[in-house]
Image (cartoon, rainbow, N blue to C red):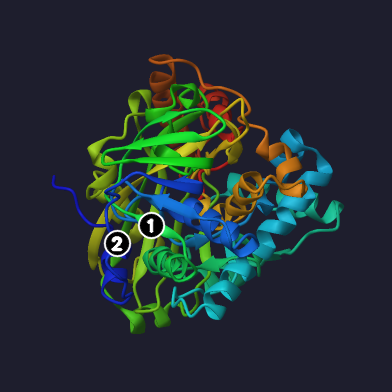
Amino acid sequence: MSLIQPFWFEQALKSVELPEIAKLNKNISADVCIVGGGYTGLWTAIKIKQQAPEQRVVLIEKGVCGQGASGRNGGCMLTFATKFQSLIRFFGLAEAIRLVQASEQAVDDIASFCQHNHIDAEVKVDGCIYTATNQPQARSLTQPIDLLSQHGINNWQQLSTEQVIKQSGSSANLAGIASHAGGSVHPGKLVLGLVKHALSIGIEIFQHTEYQDIQYGELAIIKTNAAKIIAKKVVFAINAWMGKHFKRFNRHITLVSSDMLITQPMPELLEDIGLVHGKAIADSRIFVHYYRTTQDGRLMLGKGGNMFAFNNRMLPAFEQPSQYRPMLEQAFTRFFPTLPNAVERTWTGASDRSTTGLPFFGSLSADNNVFYGLGYSGNGVVQSFLGGDILSSMALSLDNAWTQSPMAKGPLGRFPPEPIRYLGANLVKHSVLRKERAEDQGRSSLWLDRQMSKFAAAAGKADK
């Protein structure tokens, strides 16, 4: 299989006009150097410049900004709300409440930012729906509502069977919960829109400029494939590639694929089944199915948790058409039996899954001037906006809720070493698949499969 342009990125290139972005060709200095040109790096750069316009902010990207996870995700805007229990467990009640509310506010903030800065990212703040496709899922579906309500921050409502079928467009969904805080966005148009805006406010971006090494010190020196950057502060926003350059993180994340398909335009057929909105919809599997419509009348459907990378190697398959196309098409037909199999493209993306299912941020250096963020666990569209708050606050040495957050104190927990991690991940995956297949068929799953599945469920679901 040959490498392909991400579908969203390919679309965005046709509509977003960007000036030519050069490769770094000489040694330079900067107040802040950001490594990585995806959502996290761009939001961080923009938020630094918003708060300190006098700072020289330089961003380097090894390829083209947006060609990684930011240009190939599903475009579902989902919040921390359904992970409230995990947030309480790891960060305490007060911070969990703050993070849920901040993530819900971030959905509106992304939409407002795009509107104010004339970024046509097809943002649809139409809400989100989590569904159950079998009875065991239905019995646990409302747990987030109960806990959120207990603490006065619930924005979710339970849907009747009739409502969930109507709003989700699929009779495969037996039950559902819905929130107004969520929606969808065109991933490629958002990331290229952020690039264009960053350039317009004086952020210097260099593409085809690959990070190679760092020399720590009061002034950090970033070595690239072309030149060096001497910086007062450095931010690493390379997510799934972090383990390649910093082996210390290899026990804190595991790379897993999320695979997607998208149909040819079929707006009339989507209207016939009620999909006339931009809601993000996901089922309640551990490795979820997720789907949503597009502005040009397509239907995107994806599934997380299919392929694990041994020792967190960035596999060529992460940048190729999906190896799981038959599985995706089978799911598509199950959800939408009246729609034609008009698949135009499939693709794969690498998700940096943390042990908690939550992102983490921190400092790499004794001088406290080199920072990082990663571990979005397939839920990064909204959370990377908050990551920009955390990392910009760190880079500007602010004392605020973001720098004081337990989420900014480094990773929690570790995966087993290889080859145990790889073998264990695949054993758990197959247990999950057997368990959920039995539940779909109305059968009782095996005790061992239920126990093994708890390892995946403990870290939270692989959302997108």
Q: Amino acid at mark 2?
A: Ile
Along the viewing direction, whichever of 419 and 305 lies nearer the viewer: 419
- Find residue 205 and name its label: 1
Image quadrant in which you'd find residue 206: bottom left
Secondary structure beneath disc 1? Answer: strand
Q: Amino acid at mark 1?
A: Ile
**As drawn, which residue projects farthest toward the left?**
1
Question: In this rendering, is residue 91 above or below 389?
Answer: above
Is residue 206 visible in the rendered image? The answer is yes
Question: In this rendering, is residue 203 above or below 284?
Answer: below
Q: Position of residue 52 (x, y in %)?
A: 63, 59
Mark 2 sits on what residue?
21
- Marked residue nearer the N-terminal end (2 or 1): 2
Question: In this rendering, is residue 427 above or below 162?
Answer: above
Q: Position of residue 106 (x, y in %)?
A: 64, 63
Q: Position of residue 255 (x, y in %)?
A: 41, 34
Is 382 positioned to the left or the right of 195 in the image? right
* Quarter placement of the N terminus: top left
Is 113 positioned to the left or the right of 324 in the image? right
* Disc 1 packing (10 Å; few <14; some 14–19; many ≥20): many
Is 86 positioned to the left or the right of 391 in the image? right
Along the viewing direction, whichever of 40 and 342 lies nearer the viewer: 40
Q: Position of residue 113 (x, y in %)?
A: 57, 72
* Disc 2 packing (10 Å; few <14; some 14–19; many ≥20): some
- At 31% across and 75% down in the image, what residue appears? 17
- Find residue 100 and name its label: none
- What is the distance, in whole Å, between disc 2 and disc 1 at their CAs? 7 Å
State yes or no: discs 2 and 1 in contact (Cβ < 8 Å): yes
